[in-house]
Image: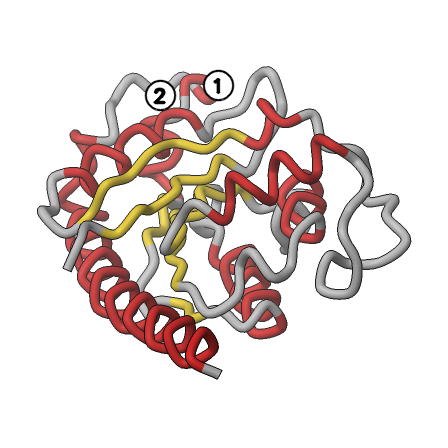
Amino acid sequence: MSKLKIAVIISSTRPTRFGDLPAQWILEKANERPEIEAEIVDIRDFDLPFFDEMASNAWMPSANQNAVKWQNKISEFDGYIFVTAEYNRAITGALKNAIDQAYTNWNKKVFGAVGYGSVGGARAIENLRTIGVELQMVSTRSAVHIAGADFMAVHPGFGGTKTLTDIEPAIGNSAKDMLDQLVWWGQATKAAREDEAVAQAAE
């Protein structure tokens, strides 16, 4: 089977965001896997409007060309790793808006998550999993949570001087589990989508 194309999606668009560091770290971990070809997809690069379409693209094509560009990019991938901050016990507004700009493009694909913050983005990742159900996605059971003292140690804004590699004893096993599950579900859903496409073509 060909490699799984995986997008590492950075969820924060703030100029002072932390997300670039864990995104680069998990990108490297993902690309160490022979089954994965991963790349970073930065929401900030797409200049998405606040959702203003007449309806979801599940019902009609989107009019905004930046939204269409985003949908086309999302469609390139077999699965996703969301690198997410936690804002008020949920994912970032930028990520929710980006998710809402597409629907069919996410369907029947797998996702994992890397969360960060005082509780490791745990509530944001649970929020993301709930959204994923509506999008007909499969969530990995395991996620990476960069939390507490480890988060403070790697965040430059809190005076942290350590790298993500320095805290791998705390988060490395979770990353391995998440990637193992991403590969299993990614291969399963990719095969199922391909079978479905063949069946539809034969109708």
Among the 4 quarters of the image, the one containing residue 180? bottom left
Residue visible at 47% across and 58% down in the picture: 122
Q: Nearer the viewer, residue 131 or 137?
A: 137
- Kindly check if marks 2 and 1 are in contact, taking CB atoms under 8 A apart as contact: yes
Residue visible at 61% across and 66% down in the picture: 131
List x then y, in percent, for residue 171: 23, 48
Residue visible at 27% across and 35% down in the picture: 27
- Residue marked by disc 2: 160
| Mark 1 residue type | Gly
List x then y, in percent, for residue 25: 26, 32
Q: Secondary structure at mark 2?
A: loop
- Residue marked by disc 1: 157
Q: Give the alpha-carbon distance from disc 2 to disc 1, as whole Å.
A: 7 Å
List x then y, in percent, for residue 9: 46, 39
| Mark 2 residue type | Gly
Among the 4 quarters of the image, the one containing residue 40? top left
Compared to residue 139, the image places residue 62 above or below, namely above
Residue visible at 63% across and 27% down in the picture: 46
Q: Total number of numbered labels?
A: 2
Compared to residue 58, the image places residue 136 above or below, namely below
Q: Quadrant of the N terminus?
A: bottom left
| Left/right of residue 199 with respect to residue 28 in the rendered view | right
Q: Nearer the viewer, residue 180 or 85?
A: 180
Circle 1 crowding by C-alpha within 10 Å: few under 14, some 14–19, many from 20: few
Q: Nearer the viewer, residue 160 or 80?
A: 80
Compared to residue 167, the image places residue 1 above or below, namely below
Circle 2 crowding by C-alpha within 10 Å: few under 14, some 14–19, many from 20: some
Q: Secondary structure at mark 1?
A: helix
